[in-house]
Amino acid sequence: MATSPTHPPRSANELRSAFSGFFASRGHTAVPSASLIPHDPTLMFTVAGMVPFKPYFMGDEVAPYQRAVTVQKCVRAGGKHNDLDEVGRTKRHLVFFEMLGNFSFGDYFKSDAIPWSWELVTEVFGFDGDRLWITVHESDDEAEAMWHEQVGVPMERIQRLGDKDNFWQAGDTGPCGPCSEIHVDLRGPAERAAVDGATLVNNDDPQVIEIWNLVFMQFERKANGSLVTLPAQHVDTGMGFERLARAVVGASSNYDTEVFKPYLRKLEALSGLTYGE
Ligand code: SER
């Protein structure tokens, strides 16, 4: 399963461009990042790349394009998606971050989204497939079969999990659906030999981290908790840009990446202190 592109993208701008270019060449319109303040009374901030597109998922508005790719600025500092308590305690949570995402508005669904994500992660970003773990919703036989039969991921690298890990919705109400995640094991050879990565997926291990979430939007969550099937099926994916920047260089912290270096250098100059000491 290992692949090795000759010149994999590594810098922050190369990574953003590689993601956008990959989906632009597959018919996606590159849409600029929307405001952090959403036009949405159910959310305080834009918490994910899908937020500006909610009316398209709900069927309230017709999308001007059927496929979109974005690098969306996000804040998770309150409400259902609140990372505030994790920031500073882990090396992978941020209050402000960028989310790389591809979207289908009633166009393609799982059978394109899944193989494209694998192709991008292994052939463009250069991840070794033997370090990747896949999770699917426990009810999603279809996604599991696509990962295994279409993409070739061994069954022992696919985990079926419940709503807590593999069902996604932006707020208490609104569009939602089962999801499938890609996790990467960044541990060294000795640690990998000692402890099976399977046991560390979704287990708060600092080196076995989720990098991409593919949501198969097909329901609306009503205020009374019930699920109603949406008029069409959609795709909403989100990859944490800073985590990607960290994972492609094998760093052990989001902060040890080119994304944060200019800020850290400036802080060192201003404070006279050395980062890391
Ligand atoms: N909306 C999903 C998430 O934020 C995928 O983009 O994880």
Image: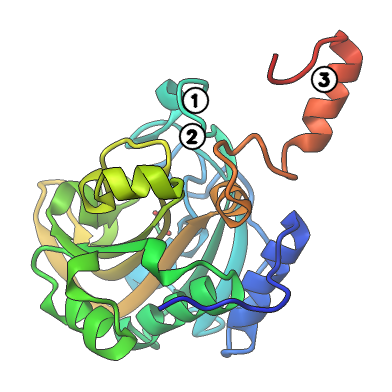
Image quarter where the C terminus lies is top right
Residue 56: % across, % down: 42, 72
Residue 226: % across, % down: 9, 55
Of the numbered discs 2 and 1, the one sitting upstream in the chain is 1
Q: Nearer the viewer, residue 258 or 198?
A: 198
**Residue lying at 69% horizontally and 42% vertically, measured from the top left:** 257
Residue found at the very far right of the displayed protein: 269
Of the numbered discs 2 and 3, the one sitting upstream in the chain is 2
Looking at the rendered structure, the secondary structure element under dot 1 is: loop
Looking at the rendered structure, the secondary structure element under dot 3 is: helix
Image quarter where the N terminus lies is bottom left
Residue under pointer 1: 87
Residue 93: mark in rendering: 2
How packed mark 2 is, by other alpha carbons closer than 10 Å (few <14, some 14-19, many 20 or more), is many
> Which amino acid type corresponds to the residue marked 3 in the rendered image?
Leu
Residue under pointer 3: 267
What is the CA distance from the residue labelled 2 to the residue labelled 1? 5 Å
Looking at the rendered structure, the secondary structure element under dot 2 is: loop
How packed mark 3 is, by other alpha carbons closer than 10 Å (few <14, some 14-19, many 20 or more), is some
Of the numbered discs 1 and 3, the one sitting upstream in the chain is 1
> Which amino acid type corresponds to the residue marked 1 in the rendered image?
Val
